[in-house]
Image (tube, rainbow, N blue to C red):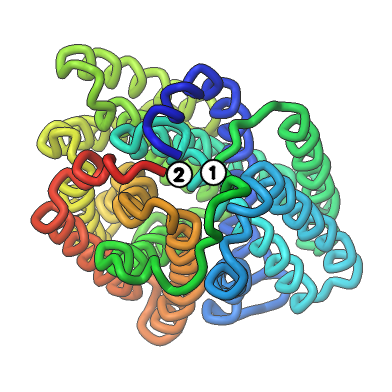
Amino acid sequence: MNNNEVKSQSRNYTIPLITITLLFFMWGFITCMNDILIPYLKQLFKLSFFESMLVQFCFFGAYFIGSLIYFFISITKGDPINKVGYKKGILFGIFLATFGCILFYPAATFSSYPLFLGALFVLGLGFTVLQITANAYVSLLGSEESASSRLNMTQAFNALGTTIAPVLGGHLIFELFSAADGSFSAVATRIPYLIFAGILLLVALLISRVKLPSFQTNDGEEVVKGWGALKFNHLKFGVFAMFCYVGGEVAVGSFIISFLEQPQIMGFDEVISKNYLSIYWGGAMIGRFLGAISLNQSISQGKKAIYMLGAAALVFLVIFSIVNLSFAQISFFLVFIVLNFIAFFIGKAAPARTLSIFAAVNVVLLISAMVNHGELAMYSVLGIGIFNSIMFSNIYTLAISGLGKYTSQGSSLVVMAILGGAIVPIFQGYLADQFGVQHSFIIPVFCYIMIFIFGAYCTKYLGHVEATESKSGH
């Protein structure tokens, strides 16, 4: 699709973006439920840290398997999404994820950890299809220059789901549907995941009724086959950066509850820790809203500052209303919001430069969490969330920028790299068993160092890649 076609359809983009944003919210919510399931299943089945991280291994491992299948289909038969269209691809992903949620019912009924892992794998396959289709679709709904801004906005609502999930999901599993005596039972997961399945079906119904612009290959065009996407060096580097980002973010989120339980940190139980987990994911939501504004090059610097200040205040109030914590307990996060503002303005709306700055900050925060104790260590690890905020969208758009007819194929490779969420937590779980939870955070330190290098590479080699490559169109 050329730039004139993009402009001609721009009037149709508002409703599609709103609809897809709702989908982003739901899959963010369900994905973050893994962080609730890990300590829950760990106690229920008496698991080690390594064994409990199989939750993330199966869920995010499905991303690798699903993306690998998609990629090999695309190089042998042609890109499936170019053939069937983004709408059908999105609906298929939703139905597959719904089936995964339904599988929690037999897993809970038979109280079987392997069945839980199987349900998570199917759920992950569904979200794989959504990652390949929905993220690429959002990047196509407008000019390439504003792709990072749009994806940050939709990812912000994804983060809203991850912010609500620890509180609402934790309430459903730990309190509402647990045994009357407070003991753990696998049955507590049945009703929540059936509810999630029902909501996903409603979202599918809504999407099926909404007219979405089509970006599939026209009948007269050549179907793209082969390994063409791999000729782009920034895509290959971006795949590795995405592996590190998802691995680092998932590993940190997976260990927050266990980290805060440590006596030298805070000694909290799960009921309290889940509220702080919401702050971690809420930080990502704040940063993504700010990123959507900061990376929008059509807004003047003065207006950006005003809009960002208003958005930060509003989202902070939303987080405060969600978590069961006092203002004094959450007020420390205002410092991170200020630091986030400064980092955005230093980045000057350049996705690659901003990515490097945020990665560097997270390296410092992780080291602080490893060497300090008490509240300072807690604040350090929770602050990582707000600096994770723009990483997915910036890595994704930098990696697939300028791919043209290879966009969906390249997207499948980037989504394949979400395998990092399966591998990195496993390694951190092993280190946690051997050397303790606090020292195990050395693993995500290396992840963010690699992200810093990718951002520096794109800054030097590609420059403002989203501007220089926009002539290729879609």
Residue 20 position within the rendered picture, expressed as x and y whole percent measured from the top left: 59, 34
Identify the residue shown where x is 31% and y is 50%: 402
Identify the residue shown where x is 20% and y is 30%: 341
In-front residue for pair 384/203? 203
Q: Secondary structure at mark 1?
A: helix
Residue kind at label 1, given as amino acid type = Thr
- Report the quarter where the N terminus lies: top left
Identify the residue shown where x is 28% and y is 40%: 470
Mark 2: few, some, or many residues within 10 Å (few <14, many ≥20)? many
The numbered dot on residue 162 is 1
Query: Considering only vertical position in the picture, is 219 above or below 210?
Result: below
Residue 207 position within the rendered picture, expressed as x and y whole percent measured from the top left: 72, 33
Are the residues tagged 1 and 2 within 8 Å (C-beta)? Answer: yes
Residue position for label 2: 281
In-front residue for pair 279/248? 248
Q: In the drawing, does residue 362 fall left or right of residue 160?
A: left
- Report the quarter where the C terminus lies: top left
| Distance between the alpha carbons at the discs numbered 1 and 2 | 6 Å
Query: Considering only vertical position in the picture, is 100 above or below 143?
Result: below
Answer with the quarter of the image where residue 108 lies.
bottom right
